[in-house]
Amino acid sequence: MLKIVSLRYFSSLRIKLHPIDLSKNIRGYMDREDTKQLVRNVIEHFSELGELTSRSMFGGYGICKGKVMFGLVSEDKFYLRANNQLESIFVTYGMNQFVYRKRGIPVLLKYYHVNESLWQNKEILRRLATYALSAASSEMREKDTQEYVRIKDLPNLNLVIERMLRQAGIKSCEELFSLGAFQSFIKIREMKKGIKSDLLFSLAGAIEGCHVVTLPTALRDDLTEQLKLYDKTKK
């Protein structure tokens, strides 16, 4: 038989009820959704660099091309990865360094905030992102150098190109990665005047670890522009 219990019974138990605050949960959910939307926007914005993906990193999302992480989205902000050379360049554009708190201890990482003025200048931002990707790729190539015994074993390269590089004073993968595609190409062209720009793109692909056909359009355009400016100054 169902027993009816009066409200006095519950009040006599002196149970203290606390109101449930859903605002924090809602704000947390909205923050996560905003961050995910920013990740999608970043990937779309830099689609010229190739097929990009994201993965969880440092409490946010790393922006990657293949296995190479060159950007970071954290707390509704986007950061570009720097190496020793890029850090000074990023600072000149007013980019602040990312501070990651590990167990309450601040740790400075080599990622720099893309501020509003850079978002407004698409051309400069594209170049900086290209540099960041190239630098991150080079660092990964350096770690994997042991896999390549000789220059000819790199993507797009062969024994003939290896010999030309050696004649130009570039005798190892490490030297090629350190000097970069453009400077390596110029050294070869100073010896062999008839060398075409196709070799420049092949060298860039070798450093990036990709076939020349899949070389990012932004990187190809940047190298083409560098070559035009270089040739113009030599006239």
Image: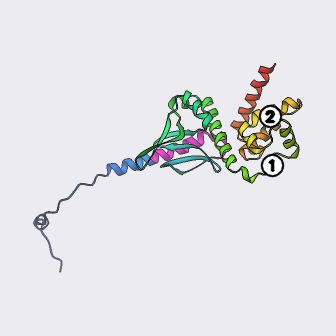
- Name the chief secondary structure element in magenta: helix
- Front-most of residues 60 and 89: 89
Looking at the rendered structure, the kind of residue marked 1 is Arg
Q: Quadrant of the N terminus?
A: bottom left
- Please report the residue visible at 24 percent of the width from the left and 54 percent of the height from the top: 19
Q: Which mark is residue 62?
A: none
Q: Secondary structure at mark 1?
A: loop
Looking at the rendered structure, the kind of residue marked 2 is Phe
Q: Extreme bottom residue here?
A: 1
Magenta stretch: give its range: 33-51
Instruction: Compute the Cα span from label 2 to label 1.
Output: 18 Å
- Front-most of residues 129 and 33: 129
Mark 2 or mark 1: whose residue is earlier in sequence: 1
Is residue 131 found left or right of 227 in the rendered image? left
Mark 1 surroundings within 10 Å by alpha-carbon count, few (fewer than 14), some (14 through 19), many (20 or more): some
Q: Quadrant of residue 170?
A: top right
